[in-house]
Amino acid sequence: MVKGRPAVSKVVVVTSGKGGVGKTTTSANVATGIAMSGKKTVAIDFDVGLRNLDLVMGCERRVVYDFVNVIRGEAKLNQALIRDKRIETLHVLPASQTRDKDALDPEGVGRIIGELRDMGFDYIICDSPAGIERGAQMAMFYADEAIVVTNPEVSSVRDSDRVLGLLAAKTSRAQAGAPPIHPHLLLTRYSPAMVKRGEMLSVADVLELLGIPLLGVIPESKAVLQSSNKGTPAILDETTDVAQAYLDVVYRFMGQEREHRFIEEERRGFFGRLFG
Amino acid sequence: MLETAPEARSESRSATSSKRQVAFDLKGTMAPLTVLRLRATDVAIIERQLRVKIAQLPQLFVDAPVLLDLGALGDDAAALPFAELVQALKLCKLVPVAVSNVPDALRAAAVAAGLGVLQPQAAPRVPERAAAEPAAPEAEVAAPDATARPTARPAAHGGPVVVTQPVRSGQIVYAQNNDLVVLASVNAGAQVIADGHVHIYATLRGRAVAGAQGLLGARIFCQKLEAELVAISGAYIMPDEIPAERRGKPAQIYLENGECRIAGL
């Protein structure tokens, strides 16, 4: 798939406020999925000091230089970029394990994103750390679009709401008076059975609370944990429902219409329907 | 304003000791000052609207010292061309003297334009009882801020402040000397405050304060009452005190004999 220099690269922040809701999993899967479609893609780990994205994407043994090294001029960008072994168009810019988030500053981050644009990346996926402090604000600062990862429970929804406020106020688009960032809601760890029993917020509940368009629903699944541990993003094993859900998300994100799935409980068999 | 007082006093002392004759007294004082609370950064628009206002009450504005308040601009303040604005104000026969609520990054630009810089003021005034547990201490202090992008009109005209976007957790919207109209939900952890009435044409899940400066007749109206707190002139109601039959329904809150009452709509 030979293609010329893209008109514009898209900077996408994957964010949530709350920790443990699936930001890194989503970053890895969305970056992988977009790259699978032939788009030149890089995933940047903004969680400086914790460094997880390289593990989830299975390239932790190839990390020599990191994001902070590049910001500080200790290494060149292409020395720190790791090219994925499975998908040629996929790259990872790992976080530093030894520094903290104060090492990130708007000028430095802006410079790196500018360089990635110049290198012809179509998609720059920024994996935000949890919280709303410096690391998270740096991850969202240059974003054009945002994927807000939310679990169907009240505290996660509240934190996402807070992050949506920050996206509208504390980003370079907001400061320049440019058109606002498009937020997309990604509901992860969703269990239709629990929703039915009233033990979990439903898609409709979350949409009513947050009021942003739904990008997709990722069902709760053991496949996520297994794939994280293996360092193989779940989207690569198309037999799982998680992979199917993330593929839908990637297609929708890139502008294709796809019907939402995994919102209702799995259809029961003929007899189940007959006697249900 | 008062924060400059100690410094001013010590300067005046050194002035007296170095010269026997006292050439002046320095005083930290509160002088009446017209505040121009900016809600737009387009100098042409500001000037045009200002001229209309001046035409109505010319004697009030001639040679009047003016304080520029950037508090309502939020992050949009960065787009303000100070020199151009100062020039425009002078053309209107106003004397811009200083600027308040100026972001650190813009201090130098303000000083370069010949403006003094007043210490930033605290967050919008919230009645003490209502402010007992601020939902988010570092909240984007947002009079209609960049976040909500409300179509806010200048307060002096008396038209309400209108917010069209959801007010999200951690955000504060304050309509000073004015009513506040919110066309989207006020989410949990958000605060809407008005010196007049508060109208919410959606769900109120956060905190709403009407009559923040003591207007006893102020009311709160909302389409769906799920508030964390509602307060009028300092009297307030917590969620547990909202009767079950009023919860989740259209409601108005008003003051009667010094206590908040909830009624249907």
Image: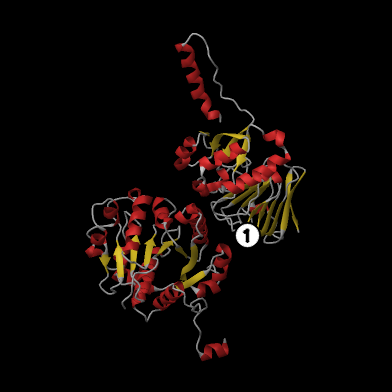
The image quarter containing residue B204 is bottom right
A112, A215: nearer the viewer: A112
Instruction: Tell me where residue A251 appears, x and y as whole percent.
Output: 43, 76
Farthest residue to the right: give it.
B257
Q: Quadrant of the N terminus of chain A?
A: bottom left
Q: Which residue is mark 1?
A: B184
Q: Is residue B99 among the parts visible in the rendering?
A: yes
* Residue displayed at 28% across by 73% down: A88
Instruction: Tell me where residue A245 appears, x and y as whole percent.
Output: 43, 76
Instruction: Tell me where residue A45 appears, x and y as whole percent.
Output: 34, 60
Farthest residue to the front: give it.
B91
Amino acid type, callout 1: Ala
Label 1 secondary element: loop
Left or right: where does residue B203 sit relative to residue B122? Answer: right
Instruction: Tell me where residue A133 appears, x and y as whole percent.
Output: 42, 51
Q: Is residue B233 among the parts visible in the rendering?
A: no
Marked residue chain, label 1: B
Q: Is residue A212 above or below residue B94?
A: below
* Residue displayed at 56% across by 21% down: B27
Q: Is residue A262 above or below residue B167?
A: below
